[in-house]
Amino acid sequence: PTAGSLNRWADLVGDQAWAWDNVYPFFKKSCNFTPPNYEKISPSANISFDPDAFIPNAGPLQVSYGNYQYPYGTPFSRGLERLGFRSLAGINSGELIGYSAATSSADARTATRSSSETAFLQDAAQTTGIKIYPNALAKSILFDNNKRATGVVVQAASALQNITYTLSASREVVLSAGALLMVSGIGPAATLREHGIPVLADLPGVGQNEWDQPWMALSYKANTLTGTQIAAQNVDYNEEVVRQYIYNQSGPLSTIGGGEATGAFLSAPAQITLLIKEFL
């Protein structure tokens, strides 16, 4: 996210805990950043990054540029610069207006994806007493007469029968799925009654005002190496890239899947405006 978007969020909800300066330290603490390895990535990529965007040896979420950058990244960056984009030292410092190579949640050591499951959940499973219920779907939150959450109703994954059970909370119920509020009776009363859900608390804002940004992708033919050979199942080519990945965690299969150069703008440079008009 950008500093501006988080500050805007904090102002809208009236809670400065969500402001950039308050949230940014937690982003930094969560990540373990690996700089570009130019023994595996071509030095011609010349990736810029802000070392202050990360804390050394933090984690457990692995963040890197992967171990391969397709060769179109360098000329693409030059093209963005000619169009008026400003070069950024990475896009992890709260600023996106410009262009830079993108990082991803990838472990450069193993050239594999790093996710909330592999990083946080597995770490907690090994270092704490957390109990994990796999293949379980939370259906609703349970409340006592004082409207205090006491547990959740869970449905087990079973192809043979419908199995539900209750997990009781000794301290609190923490949600990562906001839809559970509405199915549990918290939300706009009219919407809840429409779906036959008893109203526990009439809160019109729940489940509303979701914001999203428009996104579109344009594809062009280019006279350069891309992942097309892999998709086309070129046997000789794929044999070599598989060997590179298995024995050295390098080559095209160790890429993060794009992001060699990423650009963003608030108002389109004149050249882009002309291209958009021509396209439309």
Image (cartoon, rainbow, N blue to C red):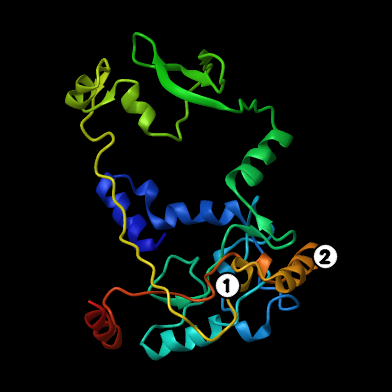
N-terminal of the pair, mark 1 or mark 2, is: 1
Q: Secondary structure at mark 1?
A: helix
Label for residue 201? none
Q: Write the residue at 68% across / 39% down.
A: 122
Q: Position of residue 241 (x, y in %)?
A: 73, 70
For the residue marked with disc 2, what is the amino acid?
Answer: Tyr
Q: Is residue 119 left or right of residue 147?
A: right
Q: Which residue, given by chain and number where applicable, does mark 1 sit on?
A: 228
Q: In the rendered view, tell whether residue 197 sits above or below residue 23.
A: above
Few, some or many residues within 10 Å of mark 2 (<14, 14–19, 20+) = few
Residue, far bottom = 82
Q: In the rendered view, tell whether residue 175 sits above or below residue 102.
A: above
Q: Write the residue at 46% across / 81% down.
A: 221
Q: Which residue, given by chain and number where applicable, does mark 2 sit on?
A: 247
Few, some or many residues within 10 Å of mark 1 (<14, 14–19, 20+) = few
Quadrant of the rendered structure where residue 247 is? bottom right
Mark 1–mark 2 CB contact (< 8 Å): no
Quadrant of the rendered structure where residue 15 is? top left
Q: Position of residue 129 (x, y in %)?
A: 69, 27
Residue closest to the eye, 143 or 136: 136
Q: Is residue 217 left or right of residue 37?
A: left
Quadrant of the rendered structure where residue 194 is? top left
Q: Position of residue 43 (x, y in %)?
A: 67, 84
Question: Which is closer to the viewer, label 1 or label 2?
Answer: 1
Give the distance between the C-alpha atoms of the residues marked 1 and 2, in whole angstroms: 22 Å
In which quadrant of the rendered image does the N terminus lie? bottom left
Residue, far left = 190
Q: Is residue 102 left or right of residue 22?
A: right
Q: Position of residue 117 (x, y in %)?
A: 61, 42
